[in-house]
Amino acid sequence: MRPLKQLVRFGWEQALSCLFPVVIFASLAITQLVPLPFLPRYDWLLIICLFMQWWMVRSGLETWDELKVITLFHLIGLALELFKVHMGSWSYPEEGYSKVFGVPLYSGFMYASVASYLCQAWRRLKIELVKWPSLLLVVPLAAAIYLNFFTHHFWIDIRFWLAGLVIIVFWPSWVTYEVNETRYRMPLALSFVLIGFFIWIAENIATFFGAWEYPNQTDAWSLVHLGKVSSWLLLVIVSFLIVATLKQVKGKRRTGVDASQSL
């Protein structure tokens, strides 16, 4: 029974870490089924996301440092949305006062919710990284992955080359986590794949409830192409690298402060 109990506890901790994404999906479903008065749907979604973000910080579920990371992801995601919608990769067909160049501002929170999940899971599962690569490798790799989302529209798509580099750079790396005071470990590359796959599932749910619309979903909803897993995989890697780097830097600063106080 112990493995089953550990699995249930692990699932519970993951569910708590997904609180922000769950609220977003619930809001998408509710506003799709029950039209709200006074404002267009996209504007209500923005209000709900802003209130949820405020409540998570107010209640202590997220720290101010985590809010800074999440805000960074909101801006990164919004920049990507503006470009992709302009290029016709997907669209937001509904009306809204909070749309900028065809992109509703609530869309940035969908990216921010990924960062929220990572920050929450990091703290709840007491995640530690083993054999984390040098910043000289991590930062350029993350930048190249993000830039490829833009440049592949004008140049060759190098996502699979980048995925290969990720495997090479992170092959020796592990992530360790704790469930009921028992430590487990997983290859870091495998964790990227699993998170990317589950975000692809979440993307199907989001498009079903009209969060956005791909060109092949204009007439009727259809399953998001499985090839999108690679896109989400790379985006998750960027997210994880940013969160991990900030956690590493903060951890070193805390260690330095503790050492100076002990002196």
Image: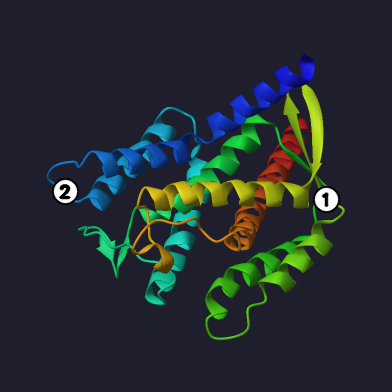
Name the residue at 45% across, 57% down. 222
- Where residue 260 sits in the image (x, y, percent)? 74, 38
Q: Residues within 10 Å of mark 1 (few under 14, many from 20)?
A: some
Which of 252/120 is in front?
A: 120
Q: Is residue 204 visible?
A: yes
- Quadrant of the snapshot with the C terminus: top right
Report the side of 254 relative to 47 (left or right).
right
Describe the element under mark 2 as helix, strand or loop: loop
Which-is-in-front pick, marks 2 and 1?
A: 2
- Quadrant of the snapshot with the N terminus: top right
> Which residue in the protein does label 2 denote?
39
- Where residue 38 sits in the image (x, y, percent)? 12, 45
Determine which quarter of the picture holds residue 52: top left
Amino acid residing under circle 2: Leu
Determine which quarter of the picture holds residue 120: top right
- Where residue 59 sits in the image (x, y, percent)? 42, 27
Which of 190/120 is in front?
A: 190
> Which residue in the protein does label 1 denote?
173
Which of 43/143 is in front?
A: 43
Q: Residue furthest top?
A: 1
Q: Residues within 10 Å of mark 2 (few under 14, many from 20)?
A: few
Amino acid residing under circle 1: Ser
Q: CA distance from mark 2 to mark 1?
A: 48 Å
Name the residue at 66% across, 46% down. 247
